[in-house]
Image (cartoon, helix red, strand yellow):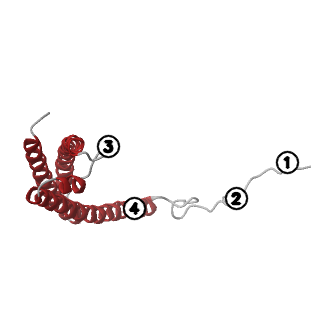
């Protein structure tokens, strides 16, 4: 059996790292909003790469947190497969449990802000894509000749609008 205070300290360290990663993700998402409003594609590409790396790091932190939480849950006799931080903090001392609860609430608050920003960024990106589609359609319509277009002054073909269809019913 490992050192329980050491595991709790490790859990707290992971939560601090996770909180900082969430702060970085929040900042990148705000920068993404600015790049979207300026239609700055090179900056957007860089930000997306940074965001992907942060999300990978967050996934690793969550996995480490889950493993430690599961171990501590077994030690404290919590009868769930993956105990939540709220369940664990009730089994810890008031001081340590309070710090873990505070970190958890901070992570959740930042995650909600990131979710709202991401939703807005998605709407901006969709509006930009719709604008590009509309401009493309407009330009194509300007330069596409009409179906029966002839050069100016050319004689009009009397049969151009006729529909040739064979009725095969007897």
**Left or right: where 109 falls relative to 153:** left
Residue drawn 19% across and 43% down?
A: 72
Tag count: 4
Q: Residue furthest top?
A: 1
Q: Which residue is mark 4?
A: 139
Disc on the earlier residue, 2 or 3: 3
Image height of 51 relative to 125, above or below? above
Q: Which residue is mark 1?
A: 168
Marks 4 and 1 sit apart, C-alpha to C-alpha, by 42 Å
Image height of 13 relative to 120, above or below? above
Label 3, secondary structure: give it: loop
Tell me, yes or no, whether the two marked residues, 1 and 3, touch with CB atoms within 8 Å: no
Marks 2 and 3 sit apart, C-alpha to C-alpha, by 78 Å
Marks 4 and 3 sit apart, C-alpha to C-alpha, by 59 Å
Disc on the earlier residue, 4 or 1: 4
Decide which of 128, 15 is in the foreground and name it: 15
Task: Specify the label residue 159 is tagged with.
Answer: 2
Q: Residue furthest right?
A: 170
State which mark lies toward you, 1 or 3.
Answer: 3
State which mark lies toward you, 4 or 2.
Answer: 4
Disc on the earlier residue, 4 or 2: 4
- Percent of width and height locating residue 153: 54, 64
State which mark lies toward you, 4 or 3.
Answer: 3
State which mark lies toward you, 2 or 1.
Answer: 1
- Which image quarter holds the N terminus? top left
Marks 1 and 3 sit apart, C-alpha to C-alpha, by 72 Å
Quadrant position of residue 2: top left
Q: Which residue is mark 3?
A: 81
Marks 2 and 1 sit apart, C-alpha to C-alpha, by 22 Å
Marks 4 and 2 sit apart, C-alpha to C-alpha, by 30 Å
Disc on the earlier residue, 4 or 3: 3
């Amino acid at each position: 059996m490992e050192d329980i205070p050491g595991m709790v300290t490790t859990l707290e360290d992971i939560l601090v790292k996770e909180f900082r990663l969430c702060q970085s993700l929040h900042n990148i998402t705000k920068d993404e909003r600015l790049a979207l409003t300026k239609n700055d594609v090179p900056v957007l590409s860089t930000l997306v790469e940074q965001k992907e790396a942060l999300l990978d790091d967050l996934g690793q932190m969550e996995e480490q947190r889950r493993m430690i939480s599961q171990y501590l849950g077994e030690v404290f006799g919590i009868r769930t497969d993956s105990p939540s931080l709220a369940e664990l903090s009730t089994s810890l001392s008031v001081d340590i449990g309070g710090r873990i609860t505070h970190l958890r609430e901070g992570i959740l608050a930042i995650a909600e802000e990131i979710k709202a920003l991401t939703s807005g960024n998605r709407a901006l990106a969709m509006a930009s894509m719709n604008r590009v589609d509309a401009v493309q359609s407009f330009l194509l319509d300007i330069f596409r000749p009409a179906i029966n277009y002839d050069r100016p002054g050319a004689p009009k073909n009397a049969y151009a609008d006729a529909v040739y269809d064979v009725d095969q019913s007897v």
